[in-house]
Image: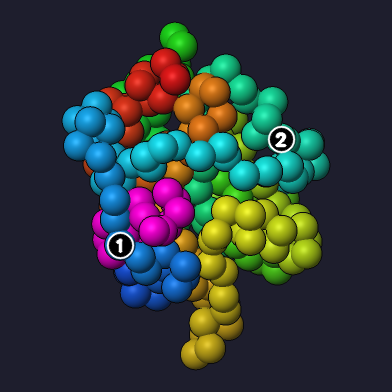
Amino acid sequence: MLPPLLAALAIVGALALISGCGSSGSKEKTVTSTTSAAKAAYKAEAVLSPPTPAPPLALRNYLGQPVNIADYRGKPVLVTFIYTHCPDVCPLITSNLRVAQNLMGAQGPSKAQIIAVSVDSKGDDRKTVTAFLKHHEMTGRMQYLIGTTQELARVWKAWGVGSERDAKDPDLVEHSGLVYGITASGKRTTLYSANFRPATIAHDVPLLASH
């Protein structure tokens, strides 16, 4: 029997197999298992049943400030893995998250903290992230975490995230095109593909906030 995370990644993994920098790692090419009860409540493409504790995630953001996912206990968190030079999937994820955030509104317990973790230790730095967030109107609206290859690799491994340079174009990174929904109690529960509908996350976040 597959572990809950591997079992629930199938539908999302299939949808996330986008060419170029958005290709998913082999760890996500699995079959899904989502209970009807959990699926009925959430609109996510995959739901972990049972939910699992969110893996460790402690890095510094692009401004040099320490960020630890454990500090957001009590509120829902959306975690994704992107990089600033990505030509397709990462801008799509970021734009959709901005729209979802607008749909949720700025106030109330359902507001989610958005955390983006770099998959490109070489290309993501304070300058590039600053420009990326400004371009996508996300300055101050999401935590963008960067680090050395060793620091980031520990997080990638803990979260089962693929990150590999494109052999034909080293400037591109093949990586996981997913968004993870974390409940207020710190459980990894929902998963969304890169082309998720913003309204889907706007619907699910209050549910994540209540668990």
Q: Which mark is residue 31?
A: 1
Instruction: Depth check: give the residue in front, 52 or 191.
Output: 52
Instruction: Depth check: give the residue in front, 63 or 93.
Output: 93
Magenta-colored stretch includes residue 115:
no
Judging from the image, what secondary structure is the residue with disc 1 in?
loop
The spot of residue 13 in percent (x, y) is 34, 61
Instruction: Pick the quarter of the image with the C terminus.
Output: top left
Which residue is at a point 57% across and 79% down the rendered structure image?
A: 165
Q: Is residue 43 left or right of residue 63?
A: left
The spot of residue 59 in percent (x, y) is 74, 45
Instruction: Pick the quarter of the image with the N terminus.
Output: bottom left
Q: Is residue 145 left or right of residue 116?
A: right
| Discs 1/2, front | 1
Give the residues drawn in magenta, as a range.
1-15
Mark 2 neighbour class, 10 Å CA radius: few under 14, some 14 to 19, many 20 or more: some
Up/down of 82 relative to 37, above or below: below
Q: Which mark is residue 68?
A: 2
